[in-house]
Image (tube, helix red, strand yellow):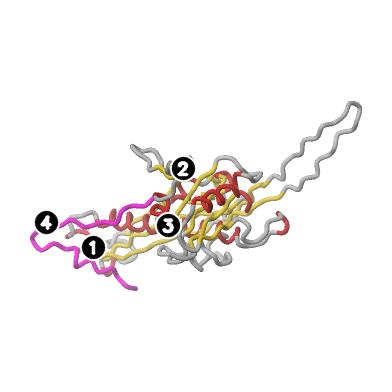
């Protein structure tokens, strides 16, 4: 087992401040519909809807035969463990435990968003925790009448007004138009700032004083996890994507919260070497309710 070497953080009779990476909040944690889970798996009902008929006086009602179905949430465990010498915790003036917990939270935010939004591989429960939005939209579903890639718009270069309008329109004109949310990789910020409508007004508005950024009036959340990757990663290096989705169909299962524990180096598991263990974990599930409730704009070339 490799112990984290903290020697570089021990000051030599001088003040020092440890530079921390900026905390990043998960866009999926922030925006998705929450579904509490009391076990490892949970089926979430998906209604087929009810038709409305106009019935003449004295005629029999038309019976509804729309098919109801369900989607499956499966909890996956995201974890982290680091080993630090007790002497380093005592000698370093900064709160080492809090710094490392914050570092893990930042990485977890990217990894969760990547798993839920942008992983291209088939779900296997480990390297691919969930069927991501990208995977769902790139896969045919005959039972739902969805054609593979029907809701993915690709931009081979500069993002255009028409492409942004088209990807929003895929959800706006569907049966699942409702409370739309937009999640995009920060790559799109530069693209947005140069796009204006026919009147010269920008389609992207930077939020001020706590208000969200907006695109065509829809709130935009940013995530570094919104880049494609074959397997789940906290540093994905594929194509940047923008996801438009009806909020109720981005379903995040809560089986266990983000939590951490410190196993001390005096009486804990590593007492014989005076090493503390910092353990972090979270159990989450994710599923897209219906492929027609989401659309993606993918930048395939710079």
Residue neighbourhood size for the residue with mark 4, other residues' Cα within 10 Å, grouped as few (<14), some (14–19), many (≥20): few
The range drawn in magenta is 1-25
Q: Position of residue 196 (x, y in %)?
A: 44, 46
Label 2, label 1: how far apart the Cα atoms are: 45 Å
Task: Say whether residue 248 is left or right of residue 5.
Answer: right
Magenta: predominant secondary structure element? loop
Residue at mark 2:
219
The earlier-in-sequence mark between 3 and 4 is 4
Kindly state the secondary structure of the residue where label 4 is placed: loop
Name the quarter where the N terminus is drawn: bottom left
- Foreground tag (1 vs 4): 4
Q: Position of residue 4 (x, y in %)?
A: 28, 68
When asked about the image quadrant of residue 187, the answer is bottom left
Label 1, label 3: how far apart the Cα atoms are: 22 Å
Residue neighbourhood size for the residue with mark 1, other residues' Cα within 10 Å, grouped as few (<14), some (14–19), many (≥20): some
Residue at mark 1:
86
């Amino acid at each position: 087992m490799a112990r984290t070497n903290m020697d570089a953080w021990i000051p030599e009779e001088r003040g020092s401040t440890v530079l921390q990476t900026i905390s990043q909040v998960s866009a999926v944690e922030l925006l998705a519909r929450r579904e509490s889970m009391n076990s490892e798996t949970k089926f979430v009902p998906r209604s087929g809807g009810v038709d409305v008929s106009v019935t003449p006086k004295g005629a029999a009602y038309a019976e509804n035969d729309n098919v109801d179905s369900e989607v499956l949430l499966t909890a996956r465990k995201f974890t982290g463990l680091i080993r630090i010498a007790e002497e380093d915790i005592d000698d370093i003036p900064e709160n080492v435990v809090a710094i490392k917990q914050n570092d893990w939270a930042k990485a977890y935010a990217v990894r969760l968003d990547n798993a839920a939004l942008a992983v291209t591989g088939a779900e296997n429960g480990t390297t691919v925790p969930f069927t991501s939005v990208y995977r769902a939209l790139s896969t045919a579903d005959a039972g739902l009448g969805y054609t593979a890639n029907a809701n993915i718009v690709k931009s081979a270069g500069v993002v255009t007004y028409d492409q942004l309008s088209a990807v929003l329109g895929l959800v706006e004109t569907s049966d699942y138009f409702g409370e739309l949310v937009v999640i995009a990789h920060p790559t799109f910020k530069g693209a947005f700032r140069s796009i204006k409508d026919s009147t010269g007004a920008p389609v992207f508005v930077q939020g001020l004083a706590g208000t969200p950024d907006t695109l065509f009036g829809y709130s935009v959340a940013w995530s570094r996890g919104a880049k494609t990757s074959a397997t789940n990663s906290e540093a994905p290096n594929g194509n940047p994507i923008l996801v438009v989705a009806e909020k109720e169909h981005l379903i995040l299962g809560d089986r266990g919260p983000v939590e951490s524990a410190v196993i001390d180096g005096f009486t804990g598991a590593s007492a014989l070497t005076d090493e503390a263990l910092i353990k972090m974990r979270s159990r989450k599930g994710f599923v897209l309710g219906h492929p027609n409730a989401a659309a993606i704009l993918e930048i395939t070339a710079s």
